[in-house]
Amino acid sequence: MNDLSLSEAGKKIKNRFLTEITAQKTKISQQIAALGSNLPDQIRVAAQAKYGPDQNKNLTAEQAQIFTTHASQITSPELLNQIKELLNLLVEAEKIKPNDRPAVINLSLTNLKKSYQNGTGDKKLAYATVNKVDNRTELKNKWNNQVVARKVFEASVLDSIPALEEAEKLLVKVQTAQAQKEVDSSLLTELENYSSAPRGEIKNKAYQAVNGDKKRVQKALEHLREISQKRIKIVEGLQNARNQTELDTAYQTIKNSDFYQSEKNRQLTDKIHTRKKVCLEIASDNSISAPLNQFLQNNLIKIIPESIQNTANEAELTRLESELKGFLKAGKGEEKEQIYQKYQGVINDILTEISQEKQR
């Protein structure tokens, strides 16, 4: 083979391998670019992509928040891919309206979410990220997409699943309070705990979302306090009666009112009426010393059920309990022992109520 032939063969070999090398270099460069491309750019593309088995469904504005509001939590291409895969599956399930889904589809959807929730690594992280907005959708659907539900569950302050769940609990309590017609000190205390929760805590986030510009929590609190004040004012007619005639008149007035139609209010009214009759009897009992006579008249007609609304109320009730127990513990022949023997029925009844109220 002459030099010219060698030269031509070399060129052919060079060209052949150069083409392959160039092709491989291009392929490798593309792979490197894909691996090393800007993750924020990939996230932005994912927000605009179509999903579902046919890749023809746009994300809702809420779902798109996964790639905007919560973009900082997507820290790797692998996690991004898991999120996109989960969205594809969820979008397919969402084609059927929640109320029209057969039980088997609801079960499959639940199992799908659980498989991600109970997964590991990026799969579990994908669930946590997607669920931040998916939970909002589920909650709004659960509440039939009511205006109040949209206002509450779309609040940006609800930045975690626990915060969303806490907001739903509070919304239920607020609606219960708004419909309340009887005193409910437990509910009042619970709402006050949300209202006074330190900023940043889950209860405070729930409070901000539910209270909103309509001041829902505050209005519920005002309603419960008004009921409590109304009860106090109505019962005062019995407590302040100076004789049996005034007592009977006050009692009949309450019985004819809407207040008395409630079982809880009826029980309270009947008890205070009975105890006031005892107090009128005590007032004319000359065998009881003036200090103890006044003590009994003042305290045997107190409202005990639902009376603890703060620590001061509880402390006052504890003092009354201690003083009444002094009648039980008095030695034989002592004045308190004689009073207890005569009026033990009402004293024991009040002590039982105090014990129940403190346990509540």
Image (spheres, rainbow, N blue to C red):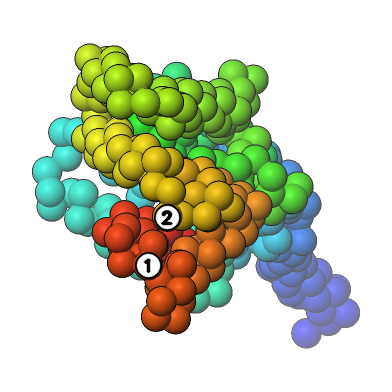
- Badge 1 is on which residue? 338
Q: Is residue 79 left or right of residue 102?
A: right
Along the line of sight, the residue nearer the viewer: 71 or 107: 107
Q: Secondary structure at mark 2?
A: loop
Q: Quadrant of the C terminus?
A: bottom left
Marks 2 and 1, Cα distance to the nearest angstrom? 10 Å
The spot of residue 261 in percent (x, y) is: 21, 24
The single residue placed furthest to the bottom in the displayed view is: 1
Within 10 Å of disc 1 (Cα), the crowding (few <14, some 14-19, many 20+) is some
Q: Amino acid at mark 1?
A: Gln
Location of residue 64 with respect to 299 vertically, above or below: above
What residue is rendered at 35% in x and 50% in y? 89
The single residue placed furthest to the front in the displayed view is: 286
The spot of residue 240 in percent (x, y) is: 46, 27
Please report contact status of discs 2 and 1: CB closer than 8 Å, yes or no: yes
What residue is rendered at 44% in x and 81% in y? 331
What residue is rendered at 43% in x and 48% in y? 286
Q: Which mark is residue 220?
A: none
The spot of residue 263 in percent (x, y) is: 21, 35
Give the mark toward the camera: 2 or 1.
2
The single residue placed furthest to the right in the displayed view is: 3
Q: Amino acid at mark 2?
A: Ser
| Residue 141 visible at all | no
- Badge 2 is on which residue? 287
